[in-house]
Amino acid sequence: MNNSSPTTAPVAIVTGGARGIGLAVARWFLARGQRVALLDIEADALQRTVADLAAPESVLGLPCDVSDPAQVQAAVDRVAAAFGRIDALVNNAGIAIFKPIAETGYADWRRVLAVNLDGPFLCSQACVPHMLAAGGGAIVNIASISGLRASTLRVAYGTSKAALIHLTKQQATELGTQGIRVNCVAPGPVDTEMAKQVHSPAIRKDYHDVIPLERYGTPEEIAEAVGFLCSPAASYVNGQLLAVDGGFDAAGIGLA
Ligand code: NAD
């Protein structure tokens, strides 16, 4: 539990925080007395989520497309103005388009890279000056096991997540010297709206067959890892990839 008053408690920005993993991460911070700004492209869903969280002093919801540099800068500056500091950034917003290479149009390719890769780059760049002003900070990028191992249908998604893993190392190397730690979480399959949209019955069976724990993860299980990496308990952890995947990566059995 954080003992700071609501007006001095640490502040985390969580992108894609209106639902799914991002919302679980937001709840993790709030349960520890921290303040949270949720940035999400779905303005209506975001408004409902903020109302449900029922913590008006500690939660700010800002509609924002993380792939748009001007929207990102404006949202991050609003968070800093409203809360007075930014300590953590969780680059969680992401989209998945699962198609064979031949059917992946250029617009699909560009949109996936814009949200999943440009988004974390832009949000991090906008947050760094505020983190430096706060005396340091922590960034966690949400990648995927699809960024660790190639499998069919994920040419754009897997490539964006592999690049995000490398972006993490670049950021950790450079920003670590300024007191900002940057790490990456690679979730295995998690039952969220995204999984409902792109995980066919065949993909679900495939995951069940290759994951040693034989099940999907929960958003809360991913949030525990993210929260740890943002916390002082991880004060010497920088540039790391933490797979929260039920043992998928360790087992090394490929997906179709
Ligand atoms: P989700 O679709 O349930 O939630 C994603 C959220 O991001 C939504 O609220 C959506 O509105 C928001 N979003 C989408 N595009 C945005 C944009 N341009 N700007 C701002 N917000 C935007 O997905 P989820 O399963 O909670 O996924 C969260 C993250 O975890 C993603 O980066 C995803 O790639 C990653 N991930 C998910 C799984 C899984 O199986 N669910 C597995 C591995 C990694």
Image (cartoon, helix red, strand yellow):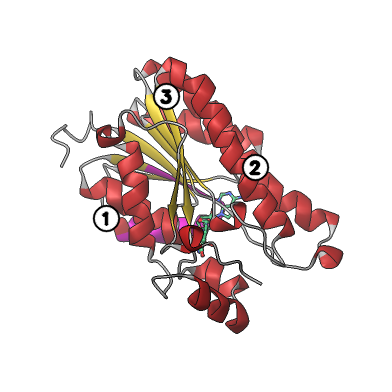
Q: Earlier in the sequence, mark 2 or mark 1?
A: 1
| Quadrant into which the N terminus falls | top left
Judged by depth in the image, the label closer to the viewer, 3 or 1, is 3
Q: Is residue 79 found inside the magenta-colored segment of the image? A: no
Tell me the number on the disc at residue 180: 3
Residue 178 visible in the picture: yes
Tell me the number on the disc at residue 33: none
Q: Nearer the viewer, residue 206 or 99?
A: 206
Label 1, secondary structure: give it: loop
| Residue that appears at 61% across and 49% down | 161
Tell me the number on the disc at residue 54: 1
Reply above or below: 7 against 37: above
| Quadrant into which the C terminus falls | bottom right
Residue type, label 1:
Ala
CA gap, disc 2 and disc 3: 20 Å
The magenta segment is 37-52
CA gap, disc 2 and disc 1: 36 Å
Quadrant in the rendering for residue 106: bottom right
